[in-house]
Amino acid sequence: MIRELQTAPSAIETRTIRKIQWRILPFIFLLYVVAYLDRVNIGFAALTMNKELGITGQQYGLLVGTFFFGYFLFEIPSNLLLHRIGARIWIARILVTWGIVAMLTGFVRNVHDLYIVRFMLGLAEAGSYPGIVLYLSYWFRQRERAQAIALVVVGIPVTSILGGPVSGLIMDHVHWLGLSGWRWLLILEGVPAVICGVLVYLLLPSRPAEAKFLTPEEKEWITTELAREEETKLKEHQISVAQTFAHLRVWHLAWIQFTFIIGLYSLGFWMPQVIKSLSSHYSNTTVGLLAVIPQVVGLAAMVLVSRSSDRSLERRYHAAIPAVIAGMAWLLLGAPNSPAVSMLLLSTIAIGVYSMLAPFWALPVEFLSGYAAASGIALINSIAALGGFVGPFAIGFIKDKTGSLSGGLAFVGISMIVSAVFLVLLPKKARATERKT
C-alpha cells in the first residue's frame, strides 16, 4: 500500500478538498453536459432530419465526423491559450461561440450547409474537454484526479439521461413557425451554452489563488500541495512543449484514445438509430426514453471504477478491462438479437466506454505539467478526435454498402479491443511518480 494513502487526512486537507469539490465540480459538470449535448444531439435530429434533407447513411457519418476535423485543427492552440490567458476567459469564449454556431445548425438548407456548420462547431468547441482536464489539474492532486474527472465526464451519460427524453419530446411536439422538430431541437439546445459562457466569465475562478470561497490558509495549503507534485514531476519528467510532440508516451496515449473514441462517439451518434431499428412502432419519444437505460447503467459503473482507480492509484487495467468489455458487446450487437438483448448489449457498451474515461485521463497529468500538460493533453485529444470521425463514418459507409449495421458495429468492437491492447502495452514508468509523492 502506498504510504500516503495510509495517512489520515488533516482537517485543512479534508475541508479544502471538500470545498473545491462542491464549488468547482458541479459547475464544470454542467459545462460538460452542455458541450456533449450540442455535439451529439444530431443523433436524435437524424431520426427525421436525414429523410427531410435526403441524407444517406454515409453522408450522415461524414457530417457528424466533420465536427472532429475542426476540433482537431484548433485543439492544441486552444489549450495553450487557455493556459496562457486563463481558464475563466477562454472557457467562456468557447461556450459562447459554440452555442451560437450550434443554434445556426437549425437553419441549414441542405447537407452541404450541414458539413460547413458542423466543421465550424468543431472549431468553436475545440479545447473544451482537454481544457477541462487541464483546469482540473490546477485544483486536484493525483489522488483525487480520476474521481474529479469522472464526476465531470459523468455528464456524458447524464446528457443522454436528461437530453434523450427532452430531445424526443421536442422532435415530436415542437413545430413552431412551421419549422421541423429537429430544427428546433438544434436551436433550443444551443441556447444553454451561451448562458453558461456568461456565467463562467462572471463566476469561475481560474486558479485556487483567485477562489473567494477558500480562506487564505486553505489557498496556501492547496497551492503548496500542487506545487510539490509539480516539482516531483519536473524532477522525473522534465518535458518542454516541443518535446511533448515527440514524446513516445504522449503518442502512445493518443493512439489508445483514438481507438477508444471510435467506440464512444459511435455510441453517441448511432444509438438512437440502433434503438429505432429494433421496432417500427417506436416513436421518437420512446427512443429517447429507451436511450436512458444504457446511460444510467454506464453512469453507475463509471463512478465505481473511478473510485477504485483512485484508491489503488492504478490506471491501465482500470481502463483496459472496460475497453475489452465494450468491444465484445459491440461485436455481439451486430448479430441478430431480440430488442431485450440489444438493450442489454447497449448497456454493456455504455459500462465499458464510460468506465474507461476517468482512469485514462488521469494518466497524462502524471508526467506532464505546465505548458507541456496543456499541449500534451490537447495533442492526445486532437488525435483522438479523428476517431470521432472514423467510427460514425465507418458505420454509415458500411451500412450503405451492405444494407446492415452489423459490419460497422463489428469494426467499432475491434477498435475498442485494440485500445485495450494498447493500454496493456503502455509502460509503467509514470507510476514511479506516484510512489514517491
Image (cartoon, helix red, strand yellow):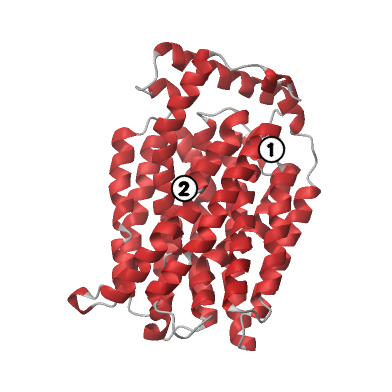
Indicate left or right for 351 with 191 as reference. Answer: right
- Compared to residue 218, the image places residue 382 above or below, namely below
Instruction: Let me know if residue 420 appears in the view.
Output: yes
- Compared to residue 226, the image places residue 404 above or below, namely below
Q: Most extreme residue toward the front, as rendered?
A: 340
Q: Could you say where residue 367 lies in the image, as x and y percent from the top left?
A: 68, 33
Q: Could you say where residue 16 lies in the image, as x and y percent from the top left?
A: 47, 20
Q: Residue at x 75, y 32 (%)?
A: 431
- Could you tell me the amino acid type at mark 1? Gln
Indicate left or right for 234 with 219 as reference. Answer: right
- Compared to residue 46, the image places residue 422 above or below, namely above
Which one is nearer the viewer's eye here, 362 or 291?
291
Residue 243 — which label? 1
- Could you tell me the amino acid type at mark 2? Ser
The quarter of the image holding the C terminus is top right
Mark 2 surroundings within 10 Å by alpha-carbon count, few (fewer than 14), some (14 through 19), many (20 or more)? many
Indicate left or right for 409 with 80 as reference. Answer: right
Give the mark nearer the N terminus: 1 vs 2: 2
Q: Residue at x 69, y 20 (%)?
A: 6
- Compared to residue 363, the image places residue 399 above or below, namely below
Indicate left or right for 345 with 76 as reference. Answer: right
SS class, disc 2: helix
SS class, disc 1: helix
Which one is nearer the viewer's eye here, 157 or 115?
157
Mark 1 surroundings within 10 Å by alpha-carbon count, few (fewer than 14), some (14 through 19), many (20 or more)? few
> Pointer 2: what residue?
128
The quarter of the image holding the N terminus is top right
Quarter residue 288 falls in: bottom left
